[in-house]
């Protein structure tokens, strides 16, 4: 840490000021003031003063009065009083009320004063470091509280349980890369058609900004679950809303699925998320469907992909945090590894399957931190 080491010397006698300059020549910079008023003006304009050496007897104000008036201006500065007499009461007042580090009786011995100043500078260094530590501690405590609030918001927004649909099983596994994440997911059931709606998304960025942006977006999504919009219409509507009302740098990749449980018919629209994987008869295939993330371009339209989930089929939706994971050698968990993990665990119950897929990712990563949030949703037709 680079600390200021400038000395402010205050004395109404020119000879004493000259002697103080000689005491610290070639060691520390010295600013000289011939009166308390002049010295106060200097203290107000200079924040780099580490040591104040003030004569006690000055015509415009005493050294103690001057030092007291510098407490708010230079709270950490080391204060030394030069005195030609030893009035104990006065010196005790100086020490108690003005934070005086030492008093030095005139005439002073330059080497002794130099040693006193150097000890004072050490105290000054510790004081500044302690203050910096205190501010950092307060900042971290405030940040921890803000993160806790963000976590609570996210816990409230993200569904704790998957919907219970006759003839199907569902599970979700979610892990933020940081204290709070930018991934989001939600489920809805249309009471009129009985359709299951599944949305998974990934807000650009990480931590609190991404989580809060995702929270706003999730509110819009919930309001649309009850409307009779198709997945493509839903993404277009959400995109226009984001572009029109939120002029920020974030965008949101989203995929939206609507399933008719009785027939297994799926309508799917994608806005920048990884392709889903369909597992059928031991084979894992991508459901190719692409589109532009939401919040980037006004007037964007989205295409729909239609397919069916047959009895025994398994559908996996995930965020790109799955394949963005890296090992300690910075090799990525490529899609081929994810496909192999899905194939290995495909026969397991959905709740175990998503846990084990994520465990494979963490085993690959080892001690490396997650690069991005990871969300895995499994939907199986029994």
Image (tube, rainbow, N blue to C red):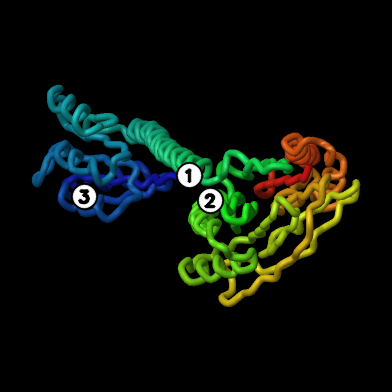
Between marks 1 and 2 in the image, the one whose residue lies nearer the viewer:
1
Considering only vertical position in the picture, is 342 above or below 224? Answer: above
- Left or right, 272 with respect to 137, comes to right
In the image, 240: left or right of 141?
right
Q: Position of residue 290 (x, y in %)?
A: 73, 67
Would you place residue 238 above or below residue 321 in this image? below
Name the residue nearer the viewer: 107 or 225: 225
Q: Count the marks: how many? A: 3
Identify the residue shown where x is 62% and y is 52%.
194
Residue nearer the viewer, 245 or 364: 245
Relative to 240, does residue 54 appear above or below in the rendering? above
Q: Earlier in the sequence, mark 1 or mark 3?
A: 3
Which residue corresponds to the image point at 15% horizontal and 22% vertical from the top-left? 88
| Residue of label 2 | 211
Measured as percent of width and height from the top left, residue 304 is found at 71, 67
Q: Nearer the N terminus, badge 1 or badge 2?
A: 1
Question: According to the image, label 1 marks what residue?
Answer: 153
- Residue denoted by label 3: 39
Q: Nearer the viewer, residue 150 or 263?
A: 263
Q: Quadrant of the C terminus?
A: top right
- Residue 118 in sight from this viewpoint: no
Say which quarter of the image contains residue 362: top right
- How far is mark 1 from mark 3, CA to CA? 54 Å
At 13% from the left and 27% from the top, the residue drawn is 90
Marked residue nearer the N-terminal end (2 or 3): 3
Q: Nearer the viewer, mark 2 or mark 3?
A: 2
**Residue furthest top as drawn:** 88
């Amino acid at each position: 840490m680079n600390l200021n080491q400038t000395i402010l010397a205050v004395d109404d006698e020119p000879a004493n000021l000259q002697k103080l300059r000689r005491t610290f020549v070639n060691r520390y910079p010295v600013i000289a003031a011939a009166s308390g008023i002049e010295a106060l003006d200097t203290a107000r304009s200079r924040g780099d003063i580490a040591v104040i050496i003030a004569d006690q007897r000055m015509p415009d104000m005493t050294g103690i009065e001057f030092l007291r008036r510098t407490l708010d201006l230079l709270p950490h500065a080391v204060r030394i009083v030069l005195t030609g007499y030893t009035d104990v009461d006065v010196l005790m007042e100086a020490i108690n009320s003005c934070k005086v580090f030492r008093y030095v009786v005139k005439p002073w011995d330059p080497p002794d004063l130099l040693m006193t100043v150097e000890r004072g500078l050490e105290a000054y260094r510790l004081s500044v470091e302690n203050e910096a530590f205190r501010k950092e501690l307060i900042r971290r405590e405030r940040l921890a509280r803000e993160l806790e609030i963000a976590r609570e918001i996210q816990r409230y927004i993200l569904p704790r349980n998957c919907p219970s649909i006759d003839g199907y099983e569902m599970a979700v596994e979610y892990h933020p890369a940081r204290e709070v994440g930018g991934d989001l997911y939600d489920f809805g059931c249309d009471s009129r058609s009985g359709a299951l709606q599944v949305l998974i998304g990934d807000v650009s960025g990480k931590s609190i900004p991404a989580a809060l942006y995702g929270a706003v977006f999730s509110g819009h999504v919930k309001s649309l679950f009850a409307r009779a919009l198709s997945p493509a219409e839903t993404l277009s509507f959400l995109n226009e809303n984001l572009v029109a009302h939120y002029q920020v740098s974030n965008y949101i990749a989203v995929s939206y699925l609507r399933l008719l449980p009785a027939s297994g018919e799926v309508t799917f629209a994608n806005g920048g998320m990884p392709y889903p994987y369909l597992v059928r008869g031991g084979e894992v295939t991508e459901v190719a469907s692409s589109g532009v993330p939401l919040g980037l371009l006004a007037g964007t339209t989205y295409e729909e992909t239609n397919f069916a989930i047959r009895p025994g089929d398994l559908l996996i939706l995930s965020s790109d945090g799955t394949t963005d994971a890296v090992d300690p050698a910075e090799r990525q968990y490529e899609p081929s590894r994810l496909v192999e993990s899905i194939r290995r665990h495909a026969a397991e119950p959905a709740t175990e399957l998503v846990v084990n897929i994520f465990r494979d990712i963490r085993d690959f990563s080892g001690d490396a931190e997650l690069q991005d949030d990871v969300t895995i949703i499994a939907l199986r037709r029994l």
